Amino acid sequence: DIQLTQSPSFLSASVGDRVTITCRASRGISSYLAWYQQKPGKAPKLLIYAASTLQSGVPSRFSGSGSGTEFTLTISSLQPEDFATYYCQQLSSYPITFGQGTRLEIK
Amino acid sequence: EVQLVESGGGLVQPGGSLRLSCAASGFTFSDHYMDWVRQAPGKGLEWVARTRNKANSYSTEYAASVKGRFTISRDDSKNSLYLQMNSLKTEDTAVYYCARGAVGTRDFDYWGQGTLVTVSS
């Protein structure tokens, strides 16, 4: 199975900050990586697919990059509604796996 | 508008069975792969199972933790997805989400609101 390790697991930041979350895969997954945002009590929401493509309707302050084994999700200027938990997901091979999550909280 | 609505969750004893349903609307259901994902209380996301579309023979994939106990199926005539869960264990307790696989990339572009399954005596 492909393991995905996110760092950090917890992040405290302020409105307006630029933040970056990293996702490392245990072996190469090309660009078969997606990022999701989940708020408490809600279903996850797709933000980025194919490592760097912004899902329709997602604000442009979100961006993704990387290929192979290292990927990043960047939020250029944090807004109050961005405080949530973020997950990466690989779709290169079965089983599909998720990272353990990064909880982003208000400082 | 794409909608996915899960139902069928509830309290079941260990060793018991439960069948989840997901009613889809607002898109051509038969074109899409469909998945189940679960989330145990306070934990992260865990992919459970996938069914491909008719063009791919409705073939299926499972997580090792549920293989042999859970069965994913679909009825394109009813725009519905199912998850038959047998031999349930306490560790199957979770919110179960159905999710639509995007055409092409197969990531999960729409999710239902989830249904809670509690396995407890």
Image (cartoon, coloured by chain):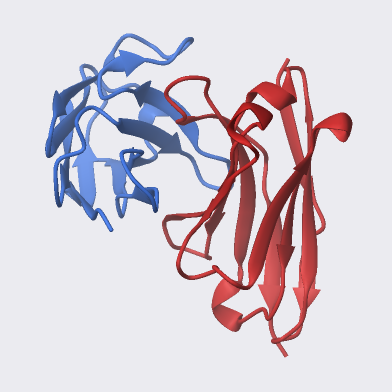
- On the image, the x and y values in percent for residue B46 come to 46, 56
Q: Is residue B120 above or below residue B51?
A: below
The answer to which quarter of the image holds residue A105 is top left
Q: Position of residue B7 (x, y in %)?
A: 81, 51
Q: Position of residue A94 (x, y in %)?
A: 38, 50
Q: Residue at x 76, y 17 (%)?
A: B26
**Can you see residue B9?**
no
Horizontal relation, residue B20 to residue B47: left or right: right
| Shade representing chain A | blue
Q: Is residue A79 above or below residue B17?
A: above
Chain red in the figure, letter: B
Position above or below: B43 against B25: below
The residue located at (73%, 90%) in the rendering is B121
Q: Residue furthest right?
A: B78
- Quadrant of the snapshot with the N terminus of chain B: top right
Q: Quadrant of residue B56?
A: top right
Asked if residue A95 can be seen in this view, the reply is yes
- Front residue of A82 and A98: A98
| Placement of A47 over or under B15, stated as above or below | above
- The one nearer the camera, B35 or A93, is A93
Taking the spot 45% from the left edge, 31% from the top edge, the residue there is: B107
Along the horizontal axis of the image, is B8 left or right of A80? Answer: right
